[in-house]
Image (spheres, helix red, strand yellow):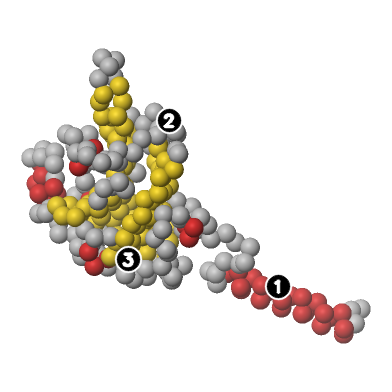
């Protein structure tokens, strides 16, 4: 027969076990867990919530503990041009947020980064396609589809736009009616085999975008790797390797993504 001391000892062990289980089920990581950006939670992209803003210095120290939101390379969906190898381009993109800023960090292996006096579209870039309210539908673009208009820009809603980030140049905002430069805090750091880039954009500069715990917007990325190459005739030509993060986005006449905003991936702002 079990004596009283043994009985109460076993009861204590059971209670401790239940308490431990509760602590692991409350959604908070234990000290042994590695932080991450949450990955793909029910189909959502989850950018990193910063309760303390990262230092924009191009060193990416605050991002090292997290997985990138998306990675581009030769295995990506290439729309036009070519990305020949991982050394030609491997591009990792992190995204973060707080209640005032959207933050981006880029780490690139890249054998060529055009700088200086080149055409605007001849720079390497990262483009964010944003449906700020996550409210675009196929029906709202039906007229453009029925008339086979290949460029849908004139049909974008007010909260459908793209942000064009050129690490060696400017940050631009293209809406249905305008194309403007927007201010940002940014630092580009070049290395022997590529670069790092860090950026902060004020949310107030992004039309109709707001952030709150649980808010969802439409988001996708398009990138361009612009490389000067010598062709068979010995001429220097620009190879514009364009890739997208979404297999469903169609191609426009210039070899980039045509922006069907109801097909964008979904990005959820979560305080984690």
Residue sitting at the far bottom: 4
Badge 3: residue crowd in 10 Å (few <14, some 14–19, many ≥20): many
Horizontal side of 84 relative to 239 (left or right) equals right
Residue in front for this viewpoint, 47 or 224: 224
Specify whether residue 46 is in view: no
Q: Residue furthest top?
A: 233
Give the mark toward the camera: 3 or 1: 3
Of residues 188 and 249, the one drawn nearer to the viewer in this rendering: 188
Does the image show residue 198? Answer: yes
Percent across and percent down for residue 17 are: 71, 73
Mark 1 lies on residue = 17
Say which mark, if any, is on residue 90: none
Mark 2, other Cα within 10 Å: few <14 / some 14–19 / many ≥20: few
* Residue at horizontal 13 percent and vertical 47 percent from the top: 153
Could you tell me which secondary element the residue under label 2 belongs to? Answer: loop
Disc with the residue nearer the chain's start (3 vs 1): 1
Q: Quadrant of residue 136?
A: bottom left
Residue that badge 3 annotates: 101
Determine the secondary structure under disc 1. helix
Expressed as whole percent of the image width and height from the top left, the position of residue 186 reads 33, 57
Task: Return the residue at label 2.
Answer: 85
Q: Residue furthest front?
A: 116
From the image, state whether disc 1 or disc 2 is nearer to you. Answer: 2
Label 1 to label 2: alpha-carbon separation: 51 Å
Q: Secondary structure at mark 3?
A: strand
Within 10 Å of the Cα at label 1, are there few (<14), some (14-19), or many (20+) other Cα atoms? few
Residue 157, placed above or below residue 14: above
Which residue lies at the image location 25% right of the left edge and 20% below the top edge?
235
Q: Position of residue 74 (x, y in %)?
A: 40, 33
């Amino acid at each position: 027969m079990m004596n009283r001391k043994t009985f109460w000892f076993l009861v204590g062990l059971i209670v401790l076990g239940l308490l431990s289980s509760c602590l692991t089920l409350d959604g908070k990581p234990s000290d042994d867990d590695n932080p991450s950006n949450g990955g793909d939670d029910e189909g959502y992209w989850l950018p990193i919530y910063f309760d303390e803003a990262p230092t924009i210095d191009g060193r990416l120290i605050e991002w090292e503990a997290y997985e990138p939101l998306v990675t581009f390379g030769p295995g990506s969906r290439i729309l036009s041009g070519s990305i020949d190898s991982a050394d030609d381009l491997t591009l990792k993109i992190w995204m973060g947020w707080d209640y005032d800023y959207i933050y981006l960090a880029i780490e690139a292996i890249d054998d060529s980064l055009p700088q200086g006096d080149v055409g605007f579209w001849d720079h390497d870039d990262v483009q964010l396609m944003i449906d700020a309210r996550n409210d675009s539908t196929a029906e709202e673009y039906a007229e453009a589809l029925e008339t086979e208009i290949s460029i849908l820009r004139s049909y974008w809603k007010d909260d459908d736009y793209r942000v064009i980030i050129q690490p060696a140049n400017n940050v631009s905002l293209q809406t249905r009616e305008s194309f403007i430069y927007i201010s940002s805090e940014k630092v580009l750091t070049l290395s022997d085999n590529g670069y790092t880039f860090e950026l902060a954009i004020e949310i107030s500069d992004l039309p109709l975008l707001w952030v709150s715990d649980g808010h969802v917007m439409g988001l996708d990325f398009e990138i361009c790797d612009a490389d000067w190459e010598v062709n068979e005739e010995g001429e220097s030509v620009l190879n514009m390797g364009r890739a997208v993060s979404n297999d469903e986005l169609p191609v426009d006449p210039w070899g980039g993504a045509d922006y069907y905003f109801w097909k964008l991936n979904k990005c959820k702002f979560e305080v984690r």
